[in-house]
Image: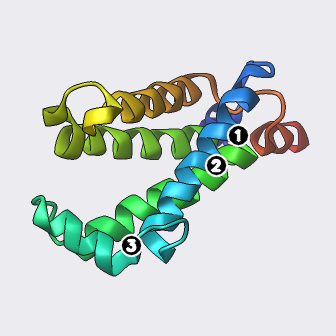
Amino acid sequence: MTTLVKRILTSDAGFAPLVLRVPVGLTLAAHGAQKLFAWFGGYGLEGTGQWMASIGLEPGYLMALLAGSAEFFGGLALVLGLLTRPAAIVTAFTMLIAIFSVHISNGLFMANNGYEYALSLLAVTVALAVQGGGKFSIDNLLVKKA
């Protein structure tokens, strides 16, 4: 295993990343499924793409595909602890885009469609990018096998 890959996968963190990874990963995957597949009351790629285009994120369909994929596949990767740091970085970037393109003008609170929830997801994903997947992750298994 190359040094770079080993550095990306290695984590000395204990159980705390698991506590963060699973609920946040499931939440992100569900939001991504809304965008990609119209599950859980979502609008799917077409509807989400039209909405994204209406707020200036063009081309809307591609932006919906990118955001939905980052959330869905990144969320699943976080749940599993597979490529935790890359998945966390991608989802953190997605949350930054959501905060500044959708929520910032509404203030902090969710009751006004504010950025508090996206900020919470951003904080968790940045923490996971820093500490890695932890003891109970596929990343940890891969490093041990190498």
Q: Amino acid at mark 1?
A: Val
Mark 1–mark 2 distance (CA, rounded to whole Å)? 6 Å
Q: Is residue 143 above or below residue 70?
A: above
Q: Is residue 107 above or below residue 33?
A: above
Secondary-structure class at tag 2: helix
Q: Nearer the viewer, mark 1 or mark 3?
A: 3
Query: Label 3, on which residue?
Result: 43
Q: Are marks 1 and 2 in contact (CB under 8 Å)?
A: yes
Residue 140 in which image quadrant: top right
Residue 111 in which image quadrant: top left
Query: Label 2, on which residue?
Result: 26
Residue drawn at (48%, 67%) of the image = 41
**Side of 7 where 74 appears, left or right:** left
Residue drawn at (17%, 34%) of the image = 106
- The spot of residue 131 in percent (x, y) is 62, 22
Q: Quadrant of the C terminus?
A: top right
Q: Residues within 10 Å of mark 3 (few under 14, many from 20)?
A: some
- The spot of residue 93 in percent (x, y) is 36, 41
Is residue 52 among what the camera can see? yes
Q: Amino acid at mark 3?
A: Tyr
The residue lying toward the viewer, choosing from 87 and 112, is 112
Residue drawn at (64%, 29%) of the image = 132
Query: Label 1, on which residue?
Result: 22
